[in-house]
């Protein structure tokens, strides 16, 4: 992989991990569409390379939402403090929402890795992702609740939606926000909860590849470190832009992303089938 390819992959990661358009789908499709024959997504060192970029994204999310995580930590330590009750409620719901994806990801890791060798499948599911965004927007509840009013059952529902992101082409942030809409959250709170649950999920994915990074140094090197930094900076800009977008576009906030997924998925699918 060349430095230019690493930077392009990192920018894609930083944008698509947080935008509801599937980072995994883009990571699988982009090298094929760009004709990067020297990039093998099925190679043993590709996932560790992605893990370094994910680590940069997770650090960016921790930096952006540091007040939330600091509040969570204080509320858990001071478990009898009534002022931290709202933070404690949100924190434990974040924990519950991460469990389904962690369990499925752990037990089906080898099966899920096969998706990296299936760009056509990723393109098809990118279209499905657009359909999910389109209908989630239109089926969401008109009466909303605050984030600290989520029930544990709602957190489980959102966590199950998040599992869709294990399929290349399906967006983690899009799935969790869709689940949030159906549980009564507005755009901004759904996005916030999605990004809060992203941090442990991403760090968990990095932890799975850590043994390869530490012992075999697969995927770890100057290019990976460069990609991690670029992905982190891009992710920081992306989360800032998205929070601002959903704060000011309460109606049809998902529509542009749904249209993008349909176009990108359809064009990619036709290209892959005809090449």
Image (tube, rainbow, N blue to C red):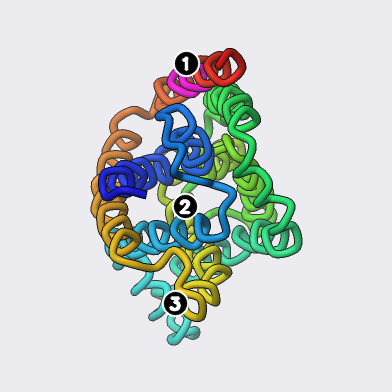
Specify start and end residues of the magenta stretch as a single range.
259-265
Residue 4 in picture, x, y percent from top left:
26, 44
Residue with the mark numbered 2? 193
Left or right placement of residue 139 versus residue 59 in this view:
right
Label 2 and label 1: CA atoms lie apart by: 28 Å
Q: Residues within 10 Å of mark 2 (few under 14, many from 20)?
A: many
**Precedes in sequence: disc 3 or disc 2:** 3
* Quadrant position of residue 227: bottom left
Q: Above or below — where is 275 with respect to 18?
A: above
Residue 144 visible in the current orientation? no
Foreground disc of the pair 2, 1 = 1
Left or right placement of residue 223 versus residue 151 in this view:
left
Residue 27 in picture, x, y percent from top left:
47, 41
**Precedes in sequence: disc 1 or disc 3:** 3
264 part of magenta stretch:
yes
Residue 127 in picture, x, y percent from top left:
58, 22
Residue with the mark numbered 1? 263
Q: Above or below — where is 247 with respect to 61?
A: above
In terms of secondary structure, where does tag 3 sit? Answer: helix
Q: Nearer the viewer, residue 125 or 180?
A: 125
Residue with the mark numbered 3? 82
Label 1 and label 3: CA atoms lie apart by: 49 Å
Q: Nearer the viewer, residue 103 or 47?
A: 47
Q: Nearer the viewer, residue 52 or 198?
A: 52
Q: Nearer the viewer, residue 78 or 213?
A: 213
Q: Above or below — where is 275 with respect to 50?
A: above
Left or right placement of residue 52 versus residue 149 in this view:
left
């Amino acid at each position: 992989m060349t430095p230019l390819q690493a930077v392009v992959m990192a920018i894609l990661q930083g944008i698509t991990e947080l935008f509801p358009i599937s980072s995994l789908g883009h990571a699988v499709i982009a090298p094929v569409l760009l004709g990067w024959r020297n990039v093998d997504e099925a190679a043993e060192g590709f996932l560790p390379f992605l893990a370094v970029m994910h680590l940069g994204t997770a650090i960016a999310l921790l930096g952006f939402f540091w007040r939330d995580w600091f509040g969570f930590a204080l509320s858990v330590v001071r478990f009898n403090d009534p002022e931290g009750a709202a933070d404690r409620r949100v924190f434990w719901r974040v924990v519950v929402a991460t469990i389904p994806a962690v369990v499925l990801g752990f037990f089906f890791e080898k099966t899920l890795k096969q998706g990296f060798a299936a760009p056509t499948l990723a393109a098809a599911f990118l279209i499905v992702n657009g359909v999910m965004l389109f209908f989630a927007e239109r089926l969401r509840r008109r009466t909303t609740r605050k984030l600290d009013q989520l029930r544990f059952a709602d957190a489980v529902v959102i966590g199950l939606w998040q599992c869709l992101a294990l399929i290349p082409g399906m967006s983690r942030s899009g799935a969790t926000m869709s689940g949030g809409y159906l549980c009564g959250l507005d755009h901004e709170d759904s996005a916030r909860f999605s990004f809060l649950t992203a941090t442990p999920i991403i760090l968990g994915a990095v932890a799975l590849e850590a043994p390869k990074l530490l012992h075999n140094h697969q995927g770890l090197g100057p290019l990976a470190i460069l990609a991690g930094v670029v992905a982190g900076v891009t992710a920081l800009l992306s989360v800032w832009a998205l929070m601002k977008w959903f704060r000011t576009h309460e109606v049809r906030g998902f529509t542009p992303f749904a249209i993008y997924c349909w176009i990108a998925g359809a064009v990619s699918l036709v290209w892959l089938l005809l090449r």
